[in-house]
Image (cartoon, rainbow, N blue to C red):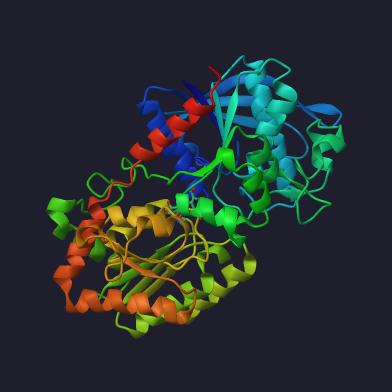
Amino acid sequence: MYIVQIAPECAPVAKVGGLGDVVFGLSRELEIRGNEVHIILPKYDCMRYDQIWGLQVSMRDLWVPWYNGAVHCTVWFGFVHGRKCFFIEPHSQDNFFNRAHYYGFPDDVSRFAFFSKAALEFLLKDNRRPDIIHCHDWQTGLVPVLLYEQYAQAGMHWQRVCYTIHNFKHQGLTGEYVLWAVGLTNIGNYFNFDRLRDNFNPTAVNLMKGGIVYANFTTTVSPTHADEARFTDQGYGLNHALDVHKGKFGGVLNGIDYDVWNPEVDPHIPSRYGLDSLDQKYANKEALRDRLLLRKEFKPIIAYVGRLDSQKGVHLIHHAIFYALRNNAQFVLLGSSPESHTNQHFWNLKRHLNDNPDCHLELAFDEDLSHLIYAGADMIIMPSLFEPCGLTQMIALKYGAVPIVRSIGGLKDTVFDKDYDGKPWEERNGFVFYNADHAGLESAMYRAINLWFAYPDDFRQLMVHGMKYDYSWCRPGQDYMNIYEHIRCK
Ligand SMILES: Nc1ncnc2c1ncn2[C@@H]1O[C@H](COP(=O)(O)OP(=O)(O)O[C@H]2O[C@H](CO)[C@@H](O)[C@H](O)[C@H]2O)[C@@H](O)[C@H]1O
């Protein structure tokens, strides 16, 4: 099959969070299964160009219709760790992708609406006719809309779209101007409740809703979150649209790429280890302490790695730091936030804890350091308010860092409580709590820290159970293949 991914991120060249990992890992798995896979991305100025091999012009002049005119673009091609990627570079005074950051601009909707249109225009003009177009999140919600309403008539009649939602909170709500911009000028036809009009904000166009309505199949990234999105407030107002289109909506649990996230071969950590050489994990704990200037005492390290977004339970992360320190544990945090007040909060906290030898807050995005943290930490904490899937806990399991998580979304599908889960002991792999409050968090942290000190053999056994889980792309890869087979034009 020929599959094209249209996405705003792809790890490690352009990664803000888990979406980038998924685009890379899934593409790799699909290639292993014998498919031809291409990835189309914006050509951001802030990408990691050191991660692209053989970058060269693929199409010098691509004219993308935009409002009443057209924008001149150049399309580049390069390999990202073996993946075949095309990068779209518009030459216009809007400077859509030369902003030093990926997201967070007032015209984000225009930037990614343009990208969606440009990706399809490129496929059309370069005579590429994939069996499946797989697009991701609100940024590419217009892809199935434009394919069906414009590009099908222009020669792309056989292409089918799988649309994956990684985060329902950001839906691309905007004014009807965006429809003019991409040439959907028969506004009334699209700006109605059956199609792109937002159900709760009737003056707004909702790009994610458009994606759900027009895609041949929509997925989110875990089975539990698929239910949450349909039946609870975690659908952020899209419950009705999901219900109407329930026949083509489902949850597929993400995988992680064990070529990248594997302590047996990880080039970013000083001491490699696996199930048969677990003791070597502790050299990484020492290395982590050396690097972050933590004192060397007989204590567990609890870590948080992730975006500092309200989704992640920022107030509980804050509380976890102090609870850990009060209970004889060390705490390491690696995270950054696009919201200035959250950043400010953690910078203040960092200053406050600056002299504490048991704590380090690294307020940055640092992929290399994240590997060392997973390898050096004894436990990882994820007190998310909602979590469509969560890759952090799956990576942690592979590295023998026991996850302490809230029972929500994909966390519920992947972490099974040591004391209370119905599964047999060999299949229990972490600590789970329910209420998003201090008492809930403390109940799980207390059990985890206590086990580490009082029953080290049991703790080690829990690490082993986690490391034995297979959360690779193998199964989800097959799930996506089944979806593609189901929707493709035969
Ligand atoms: N400061 C930092 N430095 C280095 N690395 C950092 C980092 N902050 C985050 N990361 C890395 O980014 C990834 C985070 O992935 P997650 O799935 O946990 O969260 P995210 O909310 O971004 O993803 C969304 O999409 C994914 C993919 O579908 C869903 O799993 C998830 O639930 C949904 O919220 C991990 O690989 C982590 O190591």
- Residue 172 point in image, percent of width and height: 70, 48
Using the image, determine if residue 284 lies above or below residue 329. Answer: above
Pick whichever, 45 or 105, lies toward us: 105
Say whether residue 38 is visible: no
Pick whichever, 456 or 83, lies toward us: 456
To which quarter of the image does residue 465 belong? bottom left
Using the image, determine if residue 108 lies above or below residue 291. Answer: above
Pick whichever, 65 or 218, lies toward us: 218
- Residue 466 point in image, percent of width and height: 26, 57
To which quarter of the image does residue 416 belong? bottom left
Residue at left 58%, top 22%? 57
To which quarter of the image does residue 137 belong? top right
Is 402 left, or right, of 351 in this rendering?
left
Say whether residue 287 is visible: yes
Is 392 left, or right, of 419 in this rendering?
right
Using the image, determine if residue 481 lies above or below residue 258. Answer: above
Using the image, determine if residue 401 lies above or below residue 358. Answer: above
- Residue 33 point in image, percent of width and height: 36, 26
- Residue 472 point in image, percent of width and height: 33, 43
Is 96 left, or right, of 483 in this rendering?
right
Residue at left 83%, top 35%? 189
Residue at left 76%, top 50%? 198
